[in-house]
Amino acid sequence: MHSSAAKQTGFMSLMVVQIIFLALYWWFVRYDKSAMPIDVHPEGENEPETHEEEPSKYPHFQDIQVMIFVGFGFLMTFLRKYGYSATGYSLFLASLVVQWSVLIKGFFEMEDGVIHLSLENIIDADIAAAVPLISMGALLGRTTPIQLLFMALFEVALFAANEYVALHIFSICDVGGSITVHAFGAYFGLAVSLMLRPSKDQNEPGKYEGANYVSDILAMIGTLFLWIYWPSFNSVLANGTGQERAILNTYLSLAAATVTTFVLSALVSHENKLDMVHVQNSTLAGGVAVGTVCNLLIGAHGAILIGIIAGTVSVLGYRFITPFLTAKLRIHDTCGVHNLHGMPAVISAIASVIYASLAKPEQYKSDLGDIFPAMLSQPNNETTTIILGGYGREASSQAGYQLLGIGVTVLVAIVGGILAGLALKYTNFRKLQKEEHHQDELYWEVPNEQKDE
Amino acid sequence: MHSSAAKQTGFMSLMVVQIIFLALYWWFVRYDKSAMPIDVHPEGENEPETHEEEPSKYPHFQDIQVMIFVGFGFLMTFLRKYGYSATGYSLFLASLVVQWSVLIKGFFEMEDGVIHLSLENIIDADIAAAVPLISMGALLGRTTPIQLLFMALFEVALFAANEYVALHIFSICDVGGSITVHAFGAYFGLAVSLMLRPSKDQNEPGKYEGANYVSDILAMIGTLFLWIYWPSFNSVLANGTGQERAILNTYLSLAAATVTTFVLSALVSHENKLDMVHVQNSTLAGGVAVGTVCNLLIGAHGAILIGIIAGTVSVLGYRFITPFLTAKLRIHDTCGVHNLHGMPAVISAIASVIYASLAKPEQYKSDLGDIFPAMLSQPNNETTTIILGGYGREASSQAGYQLLGIGVTVLVAIVGGILAGLALKYTNFRKLQKEEHHQDELYWEVPNEQKDE
Amino acid sequence: MHSSAAKQTGFMSLMVVQIIFLALYWWFVRYDKSAMPIDVHPEGENEPETHEEEPSKYPHFQDIQVMIFVGFGFLMTFLRKYGYSATGYSLFLASLVVQWSVLIKGFFEMEDGVIHLSLENIIDADIAAAVPLISMGALLGRTTPIQLLFMALFEVALFAANEYVALHIFSICDVGGSITVHAFGAYFGLAVSLMLRPSKDQNEPGKYEGANYVSDILAMIGTLFLWIYWPSFNSVLANGTGQERAILNTYLSLAAATVTTFVLSALVSHENKLDMVHVQNSTLAGGVAVGTVCNLLIGAHGAILIGIIAGTVSVLGYRFITPFLTAKLRIHDTCGVHNLHGMPAVISAIASVIYASLAKPEQYKSDLGDIFPAMLSQPNNETTTIILGGYGREASSQAGYQLLGIGVTVLVAIVGGILAGLALKYTNFRKLQKEEHHQDELYWEVPNEQKDE
């Protein structure tokens, strides 16, 4: 076939990337002190240091692993002829991106030219992998795997830079990553989708762009594992008593969003029937919408209120906004990431503006340095991360920075997505034709019964 | 369609429930001390308290989350045309019930009009969600979601009351919840089913009441995750050295029940072929049957013996008792919860009578206060829960209370289930017709290929 | 049917095995001290001992549970008419084997005629269950469940003996079990397969030996959970700082193997299309290939290099070696365990020879006693396991022992597999005919729609 040469070149170039990664790891990456043997007879009074904090994050890490590999992978199996790609490309993409993320985020924090590798880095890497997986949801079925993976490499680098600015320069709170991860991934993906938009005469839905009965149930595997482990995602980077609040608030927000989703889905749908698209996606909007503020003192009622709002906005988004974007702007969004990640992330950012403006140091006490380090009156000596803070920032000022954070993130994501989309469209990548969309067969050996279908 | 108005009213009323929950949380629920920031410079000698116990239960909690949302949800996907409902309604129901459970259980334990929210509450909430999910198994495919959810709200309130009586007044041991959760959920569901029983001329099996090849494999997702994480369910509320025993005994009992199930299934089935219904369900009976006694000193052999008995009773139940109940009493039990939850829970209660009658304080030592607080000679000062105990109760007396516990629980469940069934039948709820049973189409948008089938 | 009597005898004999297990547990097994109540008022100065180590391994244990029961079970559902057997027999086999493993491994380590049962034993039991599950992969669809289970009982006993020799006599390092678990399971299974090889005129592929679209996606459930939790499998027995290295190295090796697998799969396949067999299996080869050395000081680059090699060898194995073995030697290997477990395990052993030869006590410091106990200059007093070491062994000598370890393991596995195969073939077991291969129907009640297919 004439496309084999393009495929070969594409896959070969990804192998080159993998080998470059090997070289970069050889050069730059060393085990962190926590992963290095310790002296048996330490000199002086120093007892062998015990690394208590890291082990306790391992269960959280494993929960996030399930979200990234099973959660995202299966959530995208809802397309009836794209299940190999959904589970396969998400695995491929995440495996490439986690290696890249350790490097790129490491370059921002390296000491003496060395990236120190510990459990923390691979937690961060899994979180970073969520970003291009979100964007992949917007584009699902309309790119080749080669396009997707090169897009992901660029996107993660830009994500790391934006996250650095948001967290370390603006010093915003965003423990669950709604701003830096979800908003970024969603708007980047939508911007790429805008660039890849079909011509007006090709704007009808794809022939295979739909679910069947089994693929819809398989997608629920993804939904449910994302739902279950979302409290771990939102709380993994929280410290102090904020970690328990992050767990509690995420759980309640998800529960409220889920109830709201079912009710709204029945109310706005044809014949008042429930819609699996809403159930698979909008039930999770509560996890996104509470992400930025989940370790704040929002109260259980705050979490539930956010969940209700998120479920409402998300279902209405699927029902009204996505069809509008597709029909009028020709921005296709296969999984509706705008409704699951984009708008709920903006809700979370707005909530963070409100709660930050109300924050008082005397309320946050021991947690102030972890949540709003810039509001500390002096730098926290005990802090071991790069966030030093201690600017004595006012609550109203912190609220302004939260607003700046979401604004800059959305802007960077859109500009980055436009650039990435231009590159995917106008450079040498093999592109998919309309009739090649949403089906595995072009890139996968598919059993015959499927071909006959 | 004429049924749309009924649907709208039903779903709207659930939204009202959600909003009432929001108000109740606003009024009554506050973060527990463990989830509140602590003073940076504590006065006097008090060091910042470390909350060591709760974090260690978080992995247990996440395991239970998988059981509730994936385990129950997928176990019920075995019906070939009811997979959206199985995974969807279980998510919907659990999301509503966990919010309700925090409130209702909180009302029993509130201090100064405040419900203190911590990880413990949401662990309890997940456990409480299991109760109506078990009952849902009995009724699967024969109620509307609206009926199911209102039933669940009533059931959980009654469950909380009964549990309070059993644990805090009778002071029974039931760490894995076989009595308070499994027996209650099963007999409540069966009593509802009795009330909703078909007329004699409609007592044949439903047209869609069966599995197909894929739906049976999907159900194994549920079975396997329930199996895997059952030791976490049974051990999460155990303390002291009893937690490790709970893990070990549950694991061994499950393993023995599984081997027994496969053997018995082959021996009693047509042409000695294995039956997926047994494999999906009876393999789990070992987890139920060991629940009440899993932290007792039953020995590894005790656990294995209980597992063998449970597997045997459960398979024979599916083979002989369920068909009898259906044919003679017209009590339909779609998932056979009587065989997976009901009878094994009674076995567990009987085991607890036997082991309690043999219990000696000098054997249980440090664990006595956690397992049999009423047998302590004086109240345990260190205990932080509401269980004070210290009545110097004799072993024989404790055995009697165990018997009382299961008796009262089954009675309350049956009376409650009858009341709930009457309400579902004779009040204004829209009911399903025979031909509407066991299929998604009435309440879900279903892809066309399914309709054609 | 004429085969019913054979089935009955087979299943009955497994029930006898279960009852013998019950007796052996009654006789030999007692809770370990860690699972026994402690004195409330300890005499003298001894505080109640806290068992800190074990609880921290519980999350690891639960991850491994998912691998054994969901991972292996679903990985084998790829055959389109063998899904009940894949998920069912793996559950049946594991449930029987874990009970047996506690006994058989306990007999090697018992004190005063008592096997002390703690969390450690059931972690070991789950790991032991992996061994016959790997062999089952080689034989999938070509044995009866009775043959499979009796094979597993023999295999696990032989595995325990070989492991004892490798770890406690040769004192090799093998923390992730690539030598003792993966190589053993793979070569044992291949040897059984050799004994059961078809006659030359029956050497064509089985009629049902293939996947369909849904079964291939279901198999990805297995792949992804194995991938996700592999770091837990490899690190569960590691101690000290080696545990974090085991996690990091396994993660990176898996990621690199995955990228390599996708690239190689596209490059060597027909029309450069990706092959689900490779994606389901070779992506995991990185976990096997790093297993033996994952807690060594191999560096992040070492882990990535091993992953690249493993992915390459595994895909090429599926593409070229498996067809050769099938066609020329008539060794069928249904899941390709030689490519996923066999060759990657040999790679891991070779890596261990290299890294052991470079090991310096002054590098491994506090971890030397855990990783290379034989290289200690004197026995480690603090060690509580049976591995005493302290022979002052040289690095070059350790390297030699690593080589001896893999050599003896492969030899024992092959001889054992030949004996087991002879027993399965020439004793009284009912055997499957060619046309009975790879389909559930002979041993399972299958819904009609499947029969019609």
Image: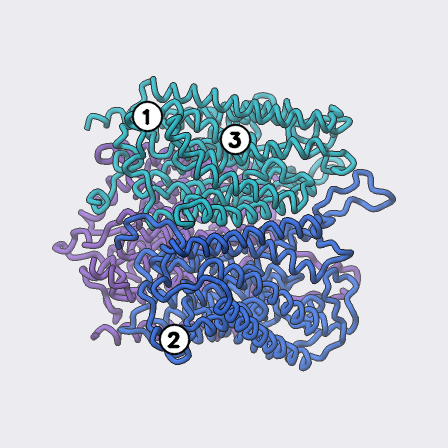
Chain colours: A purple, B cyan, C blue
Residue at coordinates 27% horizontally, 24% vertically from top-left?
Answer: B6
Three-letter code, disc 2? Ser
Chain of residue at mark 3: B
- In the drawing, does residue C402 fall left or right of residue B360? left
Chain of residue at mark 1: B
Q: Is residue B316 above or below residue A92?
A: above
Three-letter code, disc 3? Ala
Mark 2–mark 1 distance (CA, rounded to whole Å): 58 Å
One can see residue A404 in this view: no
- How packed mark 2 is, by other alpha carbons closer than 10 Å (few <14, some 14-19, many 20 or more), is few
Three-letter code, disc 1? Pro
Q: Which residue is mark 3?
A: B183
Residue C364: x %, y % from top left: 68, 70
Q: Are marks 3 and 2 in contact (CB under 8 Å)?
A: no
- How packed mark 1 is, by other alpha carbons closer than 10 Å (few <14, some 14-19, many 20 or more), is some
Numbered circle sitting on residue C199: 2
User: In terms of image quadrants, where is residue B38?
Assistant: top right
- In the drawing, does residue A136 fall left or right of residue C44? left
Among the two numbered marks 1 and 3 on one chain, the one whose residue lies closer to the N terminus: 3
Numbered circle sitting on residue A84: none
Find numbered disc 1 in the image and state the secondary structure of the residue it sits on. loop
Mark 1–mark 3 distance (CA, rounded to whole Å): 24 Å
Q: Is residue C267 above or below residue C442?
A: below
Residue A34: x %, y % from top left: 63, 61
Residue B131: x %, y % from top left: 48, 32
Across the whole image, how many numbered discs are drawn on residues? 3
Find numbered disc 3 in the image and state the secondary structure of the residue it sits on. helix
